[in-house]
Image (cartoon, rainbow, N blue to C red):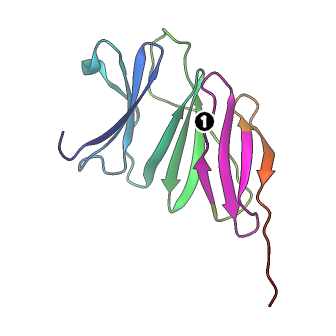
């Protein structure tokens, strides 16, 4: 459709759809059964102050990368067991970052894992890769890019 940008991911018997349009210009997240897209439900509604950047789908979780009030954030939600009905997402766990301003971007992660991998950097911390355990809420530094300085 003209003027509508959609991205779909598949898990079990549902599609998870991110939709951006003139009406929902900062995106909303929905889900529908594979065999009936007319039964789409809104998991995360459009919000004026929040822009959904990306969604990563896992076996038991969904990670939502957003921008709120100019800052990126990542919120992880539990998903019901495959085959059970899906309702509006509530009670997600937002990953805490220690710096007041920073950049965070998704990294490829395993679907059947509870580990979310992401890139993080700030004025204090050079580009780094972290693994975040979505069950326990613990982040582990996996790699840090060394910074080289040339003195002249």
Check residue 127 for magenta coloring.
yes
On screen, 61 above or below 76? above
Question: Is residue 45 visible from the viewing direction of this image?
Answer: no
Q: Position of residue 108 (x, y in %)?
A: 60, 38
The foreground one among 12 and 69 is: 12
Q: Position of residue 5 (x, y in %)?
A: 29, 43
Left or right of 147 on screen, residue 6:
left
On screen, 109 above or below 79? below
Label 1 residue SS: strand
Check residue 99 for magenta coloring.
no
Left or right of 126 on screen, residue 81:
left
Q: Position of residue 43 (x, y in %)?
A: 42, 30
Q: Residues within 10 Å of mark 1 (few under 14, many from 20)?
A: many
The foreground one among 43 and 91 is: 43
Residue at 61% of width from left, 54% of height from top? 104
Q: Position of residue 90 (x, y in %)?
A: 53, 31
Left or right of 73 on screen, residue 50:
left
Magenta residues (range): 103-131
The foreground one among 71 and 110 is: 110
Count of picture labels: 1
Residue at 41% of width from left, 18% of height from top? 14
Residue at 37% of width from left, 40% of height from top? 28
Residue marked by disc 1 = 76
Q: Quadrant of residue 150?
A: bottom right
Quadrant of image for the N terminus: top left
Left or right of 19 on screen, residue 50:
right
Residue at 49% of width from left, 38% of height from top? 55
Quadrant of image for the C terminus: bottom right
The residue sitting at the left extreme is 2
On screen, 120 above or below 37? below
The residue sitting at the top extreme is 83
Question: Is residue 129 visible from the viewing direction of this image?
Answer: yes
């Amino acid at each position: 459709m003209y003027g509508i940008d959609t991205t779909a991911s598949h898990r079990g018997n549902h599609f998870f759809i991110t939709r951006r349009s003139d009406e929902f210009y900062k995106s909303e997240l929905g889900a529908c059964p594979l065999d009936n897209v007319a039964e789409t439900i809104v998991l995360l509604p459009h919000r004026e102050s929040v822009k959904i950047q990306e969604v990563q789908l896992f076996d038991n979780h969904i990670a939502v990368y957003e921008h709120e009030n100019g800052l990126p954030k990542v919120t992880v939600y539990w998903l019901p067991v495959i085959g059970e009905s899906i309702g509006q997402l509530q009670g997600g766990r937002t990953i805490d970052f220690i710096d007041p301003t920073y950049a965070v971007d998704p990294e490829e992660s395993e679907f059947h894992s509870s580990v979310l991998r992401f890139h993080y950097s700030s004025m204090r911390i050079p580009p780094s890769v972290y693994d975040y355990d979505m069950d326990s809420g613990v982040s582990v530094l996996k790699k840090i890019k060394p910074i080289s300085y040339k003195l002249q």
